[in-house]
Image (spheres, rainbow, N blue to C red):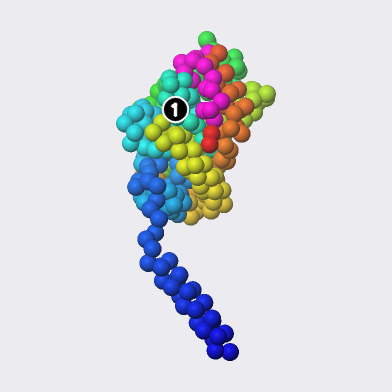
Amino acid sequence: MWKALKSSYRVAAGSLLAAVLCLAAPAQAAPYAKLVLAGPTAAVSFPLIHMVESGALADWADQVEFRHWKNPDQLRVLLAKEQVDFSATPVNLPAIMANRGLPVRLLNVSVWGLLWFISSDPAIRSVADLAGQPLLTTFQRDLPALLLERLLAAQGLTGDKAPVIRYARDAQDATALMLTGEAPTVLLPEPSVSLLLARNAQQGQPDIRRVQSLEDAWRQTFPRQPDLPQAGIMVNSHRAADEALSRAVAQAYAEATVWCKAQPALCAEEVHRHLNFLPLAAIETSIRVTRLESRDASVARPALEALYQLILDHNPEAVGGKLPDAGFYGP
């Protein structure tokens, strides 16, 4: 019996010593001191913000922050200076960079619908009604401008039938022109649309309404290419070699996307803490109406290549002159 007690004592003492040593051992350091996630004022950024708020990448970095960029030109500078590690992006920008020899990769496509035609003109009920009519937009060179150009051409809205396009400086300028009645119809992305409609309701202006999403018009015009990949997450060249990190970011983003769609009010509160110039109600509405669905770029590759080829046929420099190599499609 005494031997049994001594044996039990040794086991207990060993377990206690192991526990003490475990507590005393320093925690394993995260691989990176800091990771910067970046994005525009759009729903594609909202899951990135939730990743920061929820600590989704705590095992990978001691500090994770969200950085807001205002236009693709600013993003290009941030990428070139390696000041961001992962960023939301229109899907053509990383294709341009990859085709110029930079080892960037597109990890996913998460936005499949965010552009809307908005009008105060009751005669405008679809894109077809824009023939010869004024159309305000903020897009001149980037992906939405390319999509609009292809959509109008496919619907025969060219030459004398083309809308008379006017370019605003930015979404804020476009909103002001709509609210003062200087522009009857505009193409805007979310959440600018929700913000415009909310401000219009507050001011009691003539009815401004959603006419048609560009994505619905696209599906009707290009039935063989119904999905329209528009934005996703890219990994910058200086982080692209760490494939495990890219997979972790893609997985965390996919989970954050599901959470934001399921909890739009809570997601809106998190977004508002980082983009406090956006009203909560407009953010929440934007989450509800945006087609936000994360798919790995390797899965979305057929839809991406269909879009890239369409752009190549008419504006090849907008995707870097060729289809990206297979390694471009991540994670």
Q: Where is residue 166 drawn, in percent x and y? A: 42, 21
Report the front residue among 262 and 109: 109
Over which residues does the magenta segment extend?
A: 314-329
Residue 107 in the figure: left or right of residue 85? right
**Residue type at tag 1:** Pro
Front-lying residue, 313 or 22: 22
Instruction: Classify 10 Å Cα crowding around label 1: few (below 14), some (14-19), many (20 and above).
Output: some
Picture coordinates of residue 150, whole percent (x, y): 55, 19
Q: Nearer the viewer, residue 275 or 4?
A: 4
Quadrant of the image occupied by residue 223: top right
Residue 77 occupies which quadrant of the picture? top left
Residue at which label 1 appears: 103
Residue most toward the front?
A: 3
Q: Would you place residue 72 above or below residue 22 in this image? A: above
Q: Is residue 328 one of those drawn in magenta? A: yes
Looking at the rendered image, the quarter that the N terminus falls into is bottom right
Residue 298, placed above or below residue 256: above
Name the residue: 57% across, 85% down.
4
Left or right of 26 on screen, residue 94 = right
Q: Position of residue 21 (x, y in %)?
A: 41, 68
Q: Is residue 161 above or below residue 198?
A: above
Task: Report the label total.
Answer: 1
Q: Circle 1 — which element?
A: loop
Residue 124 belongs to the span the image colors magenta: no
